[in-house]
């Protein structure tokens, strides 16, 4: 991975509840993918979500921030990289709503990964599940299908953007 603006790997600030066990798996996924993660266990995640402007219909189990973008739930490293590379106008963050099986941190041995959405949202939650940028319109409720492969030969779900032929995350 190339250094972010010559400042090293992208840094994710993660905020998670002390009672949640799956969030640590997401943090480890990001670290394995080359992200630096400031992992904070907090008493309440809600105030962090509010400060980030995360829409209430996109809430999952933990919140985060990378650069100027909010992250909610088990957003895969590939989607974060795409966000940081493309910097789509009007997009304030990404969410994987709820907790689908197979997303980073929610892998369950013996259970096939789910199909899940990575949803872009606008500033101050504008548009809820809608995407604020025409350039990212395809990600608005983008269907992701898991592919299996990992550099460490672990079985993990890696999303691929479906819809536009030949266009992946």
Image: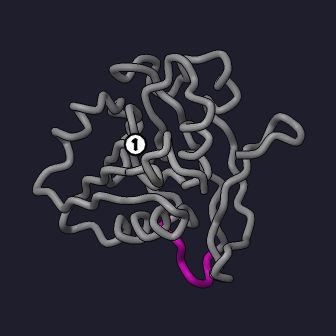
> Looking at the image, which residue is at 55% across and 54% down?
76
- State the image quarter where residue 25 is shown: bottom left
State the residue position of label 1: 66
The x and y percentages for residue 39 are 27, 61
The x and y percentages for residue 57 are 39, 34
Q: Which residues are magenta?
A: 105-111
The image shows residue 165, relative to residue 135, as above or below, that is: below
Q: Residue furthest front?
A: 6
Quadrant occupied by the N terminus? bottom right
The image shows residue 56, relative to residue 28, as above or below, that is: above
Q: Nearer the viewer, residue 113 or 11?
A: 11
The image shows residue 134, relative to residue 1, as above or below, that is: above
Crowding near the residue tagged with mark 1, few <14, some 14–19, many ≥20 C-alpha atoms within 10 Å: some
> Looking at the image, which residue is at 53% across and 50% down?
3
The majority secondary structure of the magenta stretch comes to loop
Q: Is residue 105 left or right of residue 168?
A: left
Does the magenta-highlighted stretch encompass residue 84? Answer: no
The colour scheme of the drawn protein is one colour
The x and y percentages for residue 46 are 19, 42
The x and y percentages for residue 17 are 21, 60
């Amino acid at each position: 991975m190339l250094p972010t603006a010559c400042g090293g790997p992208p840094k994710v600030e993660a905020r998670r509840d002390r009672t949640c066990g799956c969030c640590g798996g997401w943090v480890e996924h990001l670290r394995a993918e080359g992200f630096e993660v400031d992992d904070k266990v907090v008493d309440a995640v809600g105030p962090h979500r509010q400060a980030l402007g995360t829409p209430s219909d996109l809430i999952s189990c933990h919140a985060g921030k990378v650069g100027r973008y909010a992250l909610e739930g088990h957003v895969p490293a590939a989607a974060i990289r795409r966000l940081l590379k493309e910097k789509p106008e009007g997009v304030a963050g990404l969410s994987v709503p709820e907790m689908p099986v197979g997303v980073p941190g929610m892998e369950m041995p013996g259970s096939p990964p789910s199909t899940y959405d990575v949803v872009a949202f606008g500033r101050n939650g504008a548009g809820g599940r809608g995407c604020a940028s025409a350039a990212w319109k395809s990600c608005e409720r983008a269907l992701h299908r898991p592919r299996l492969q990992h550099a460490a030969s672990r079985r993990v779900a890696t999303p691929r953007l479906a819809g536009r032929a030949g266009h992946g995350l």
